[in-house]
Amino acid sequence: MSGRVLIFDTTLRDGEQSPGASMNREEKLRLAHKFASLGVDIIEVGFPAASPGDFEAVQAIAREVRGPVICGLARTRPEDIRTAWEALKDAEKARIHVFIATSDIHLQYKLRISREEVLKEIETGVSLARSLCDDVQFSAEDASRSDPDFLCQAVRMALKHGATTINIPDTVGYALPHEFEALITKIRQDVPEVAKAVMSVHCHDDLGMAVANSLAGIRAGARQAEVCMNGIGERAGNAALEELVMALATREKELGFTTGLKRNELYPTSRLVSMVTGILVQPNKAIVGANAFAHESGIHVDGVLKQPLTYEIMTPAEVGLGQNNLVLGKHSGRAGLKSRLKDMGYDLNPEDFERLFMAFKALADKKKEVFDEDLEALIADEILRIPLRWKLEYLNIVSGTVTVPTATVRIREGEKLLTGFGSGNGPVDAVYNTLAEMTGSQAKLLRFGIASVTGGVDAQGEVTARLQEGEFIALGKGADSDILVASAKAYLNGLNRLEYLKEHAPKTKNGMCSSAGGGDAA
Ligand code: KIV
Ligand code: ZN
């Protein structure tokens, strides 16, 4: 067994379906460039028919990002497929991804259609997609819980009408590795013409087996794996890109597969995804977690110092961790910053660069050493975050053991400057009460988290605030060397994201996996 496995990244589509992780056009564009530079083969960048915002983001990426195939999702409905093509048609290489469920559970309760009708949908959907685009992927949603013989019929139908990639999802993360391997094997045996297409796997992590199932699928003949950076995605997430890629690379002798990824860009890409989505990476996360290469026990440290191979199966440098130590400080000028940004893969327009330079100078005044992670946080704060309705201008806190914490806050709303004053049980509570009063927001704070961007006592604090207003949930993020300022920024960023979500509300109400093709659909 050997060969090249194509990496299909769906962070910008399935990953975006993680609660609160919705991204705006600029954020998606930035990440798409990063995935292109990481070397993924295909980027699924959205579901153009779902909302005008998604359509615009897919179109912008299709027009601008070069290298990988740019893919957009569509149900079998003609209007979905035409909308997807309209958004994708300017791409250097475009792919339409058509899907419909094939399990009886989905047919009976969600789609309310018969197996015959599903086959008809596949015929019309795939044929239409193929009449528009040479590269068409078909996915049988909930494949792992489908009757295997009916699944084979669905695959046959998609191939007959021109599908060039056949994707077998474990939509609800239910399969066990040996079952998934057997399913891919069966399809390859019973539908020999599938050899003309690329077989793909798309595994969710509900039982923690997404990567194991993907590897099992690859062992059985799949040559494309659908993954998300940091394993984000619907519910428990998708197979983690970094885990699958490093498993293939670290165990290449055993498995015999390669990918085209620049592995030393895995860690920076993971950081950027976390910054943009607001979803923090757990410290013990394989490959990209803060502790993934940290050795604590004396015996381990002693072993690693004598010979890293004793406890390290791969090196941190291989995944791009800890390569860039001190980069800049308060004496660094524009040229230094520009060159560092270039190395990090950023090419900012003059206006954005100037804004970033000012923010960098302010940070370098407070913080002796400015690391790449600090710059990423500044870029996220200054450039990538959703266009602001409210922006923090000024914050003063009085707090301590014997005083009621109070906050005086000034924010900008367009041309207007608003000033407010309030108190709370603690300093963050005081800031949040004041901001809620000033913006008239009814949003509920569901969760608050804080982490440090780098090591050291002068590290910037990175705050995430998960807010809910009605059916909308948004994750706000903010970074600053003062954690109360970071907290205020995160709250305002969350409010801005809620505004954005309300304005760009998808036409379908629920998450895409569940609503797509549902009810009245197909
Ligand atoms: O999980 C799933 O089945 C999907 C499909 C749309 C591929 O995300
Ligand atoms: Zn999925």
Image: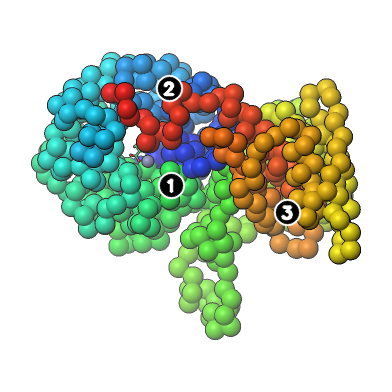
**Residue bearing mark 1:** 235
Where's ligand 1: which quadrant? top left
- Residue 83 seen anywhere in this rendered image of the structure: yes
> Which is more toward the observer, 351 or 190?
190
Q: Give the quarter of the image for residue 362.
A: top right
Q: Which image quadrant for residue 345?
A: top right
Q: Amino acid at mark 3?
A: Gly
Q: CA distance from mark 1 to mark 3?
A: 27 Å
Q: Is residue 257 left or right of residue 87?
A: left
Residue count near mark 1 (Cα–Cα under 10 Å), binned few <14, some 14–19, many ≥20: some
Mark 3 C-beta to ligand 2 under 8 Å: no
Rounded to the nearest whole Å, what is the CA distance between mark 2 and mark 1?
22 Å
Q: Quadrant of the N terminus?
A: bottom left
* Label 3 close to label 2 by CB (< 8 Å): no
- In terms of depth relative to the viewer, which is nearer, 341 or 48? 48
Question: Residue 303 or 473: which is nearer the viewer?
Answer: 473
Q: Residue at x 83, y 48 (%)?
A: 423
Label 2 belongs to which residue? 49
Label 2: state its secondary structure: loop
**CB at mark 1 closer than 8 A to ligand 2?**
no
N-terminal of the two: label 2 or label 1? 2
Q: Which residue is mark 3?
A: 461
SS class, disc 1: loop
Q: Secondary structure at mark 3?
A: strand
Q: Label 3 to label 2, Cα distance in Å?
A: 38 Å
Q: Please say whether residue 372 is visible from this viewpoint.
A: no
- Residue 382 got which mark? none
Number of numbered labels in the structure image: 3
Residue 189, position in %: x, y?
11, 44
The type of residue carrying mark 2 is Ala
